[in-house]
Amino acid sequence: DHLLLLWDTRDGKKPQESVKAHDAEVNCLSFNPEHEFLVATGSVDNTVALWDIRHLGNSLHVLAAHTRDVLQVTWSPHDPAYVASTAADRRLFIWDLNEIGGEVDPEFLQDGPPELLFSHAGHTNRISEFAWNPFHPFIFASAGEGNMLQVWSPAAEIYSTDVDIADEDLESRKVAK
């Protein structure tokens, strides 16, 4: 029914808050582990929406890059600015909310919005489960419906500011800010 409903369990007769969260059914949600009012929702409309549950009038931002139903959203246990989403398009995206509103060099527009940090496309079927490693911030496990479990990590230069990258590599990845 496209709605995000908030209930007070002391009075379960009707929702305390209700908002049309997406243009299609809501499949999943996740509360940010460090910011108690920040929620991410995933939908059949292929998007992830970010919400401040104190002010449900409009979403804070919509993360859009999936091409099929979003099935799971999960916040990083290590950094409240990272959220992951999986979808029926067999992709797992890691989003960096610090990059929302950043500019992208036109040459890299086809790679997605600036907040899309990484796309894992190693599954041949839908991803049915995903987990952040609780001890290592950028080691992940994902399981697909084809009975495939993958443990993986993006290249360090994707997420680390401490990795030395040659100047020519920086030029090839140039993003305007």
Image: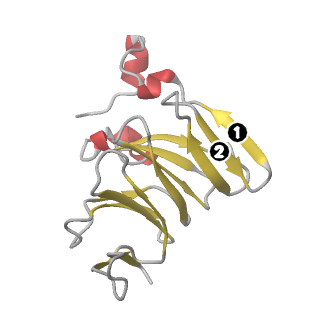
Q: Which mark is residue 150?
A: 1
Residue under the point 70% across and 39% down = 150
- Disc marking residue 24: none
Looking at the picture, does residue 136 appear above or below residue 125?
Answer: above
The residue depicted at 29 percent of the width and 40 percent of the height is 99
Crowd class of label 1 (few under 14; some 14 to 19; many from 20; radius 10 Å): some
Q: Position of residue 11 (x, y in %)?
A: 32, 82
Q: Viewed as shown, does residue 159 lie left or right of 153?
A: left
Residue bearing the label numbered 2: 142
Task: Identify the element where label 2 is drawn.
Answer: strand
Label located before the other in sequence (2 or 1): 2
Q: Nearer the viewer, residue 176 or 120?
A: 120
Image quarter (top left, top right, bottom left or bottom right) of the C terminus: top left
Mark 1 residue type: Gln
Separation (CA) of disc 2 from disc 1: 5 Å
Badges 2 and 1: C-beta atoms under 8 Å apart? yes
At a point 53% along the width and 25% down the height, the residue shown is 155
Q: Among all residues in the image, which is located at the extreme bottom?
A: 13
Give the image quarter of residue 90: bottom right
Work out whether residue 6 can be spotted.
no
Nearest the viewer among 153 and 131 is 131
Instruction: Please determine whether, in this image, residue 177 is positioned above or below residue 156.
Output: below
Q: Position of residue 96 (x, y in %)?
A: 36, 41
Q: Quadrant of the N terminus?
A: bottom left
Name the amino acid type tagged 2.
Answer: Ser
* Residue at the (31%, 32%) spot, across then down: 175
Residue 156: x and y, percent? 49, 22
